[in-house]
Image (cartoon, rainbow, N blue to C red):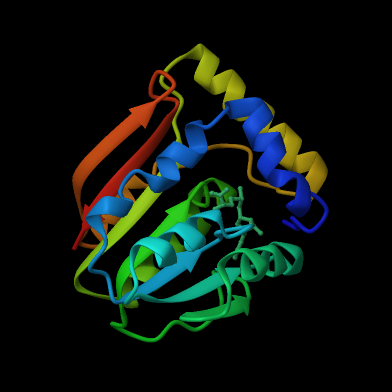
Amino acid sequence: MNCDLIAPHYWWIERLGMGRALELRRRWFLPEIGNAGRALVLGDGDGRFLRELLRRNLLVRADYVDLSRRMLELARNRAGTERVDYRQADALTVEFPAGEYDLIATHFFFDCFGPDELGALIKRVADAARPGARWIVSEFRTPNLFGRLLVSALYLFFGITTGLKTRKLVDHRPILRAHGFRLIKASHSRGALVVSELWER
Ligand SMILES: C[S@@+](CC[C@H](N)C(=O)[O-])C[C@H]1O[C@@H](n2cnc3c(N)ncnc32)[C@H](O)[C@@H]1O
């Protein structure tokens, strides 16, 4: 997947297609994570979540990891360099420090991976999480035919514009549970087409 081409247009395409629904999901649990100290922000794209995290939590230090150079540049311009280490890297292979993070954030990121990749990713990140760590996830769901059509259309769009190979949403919940996380809270909008979840280990 290479998001360089769509990176500067990503926000307005999202706004056109989904209004403010995704932004609402990304921000939903921010009031609950104000005491996080070390955050791993994976596949955050243009940094809209990262900026809000830093704005609301004046102590947190974050590691941002994204595959796309253009996305990383946008995130750095948006969120600044204070308290953030930016890495242009593949989250499937980059080295994470063991037992380091008390907060992990993955918004609309799990949908980039097939089942085996997602299992491997969650395992690697779980190894980098401290006991008691929280993980916030925003993701699409397919509760009905409209949801399935929407997600298929999104996969088609990202397949054409970024070369994304994945075509099917994987249910991340059993994988997170298998790695010791439990779902604390969940919230959804747009008839449960998009959800935010707060997990804790
Ligand atoms: C669908 S976008 C979501 C961006 C942002 N999190 C949001 O909420 O809109 C997926 C992001 O994940 C990044 N990405 C995809 N695969 C990746 C990987 N293996 N490692 C790191 N980043 C990846 C892409 O470059 C892109 O910025």
- Image quadrant holding the N terminus, namely bottom right
The correct choice, above or below, for 76 with respect to 6 in the image is below
The answer to whether one can see residue 177 in this image is no
Residue 28 pos. (x, y %):
34, 43
Front-most of 84 and 160? 84
Position in image of residue 123 (x %, y %): 37, 67
Query: Number of numbered discs present?
Result: 0
For image coordinates 42% across by 71% down, the residue present is 40
Ligand 1 is located in which of the four quadrants?
bottom right
At 63% across and 45% down in the image, what residue appears?
A: 166
Q: Position of residue 64 (x, y in %)?
A: 52, 72
Q: As displayed, is residue 50 above or below residue 172?
A: below
Query: Which residue is at 32% across, 53% downward?
Result: 30
Apparent side of residue 155 relative to residue 201 in the rendered image (left or right)? right
Q: Quadrant of residue 167?
A: top right
In which quadrant will I find the C terminus? Answer: bottom left
Residue 97's spot in the image, x, y percent? 39, 86
Relative to 154, is 35 on the left or the right? Answer: left
Can residue 140 be seen? yes
Tell me if residue 184 comes above or below residue 125 in the rendering.
above
Is residue 68 rendered to the left or right of residue 179? right
Q: Residue at x 38, y 50 (%)?
A: 137
Which of the 4 image quarters holds residue 73? bottom right
Quarter of the view holding residue 72: bottom right
The answer to whether residue 185 is left or right of residue 20 is left
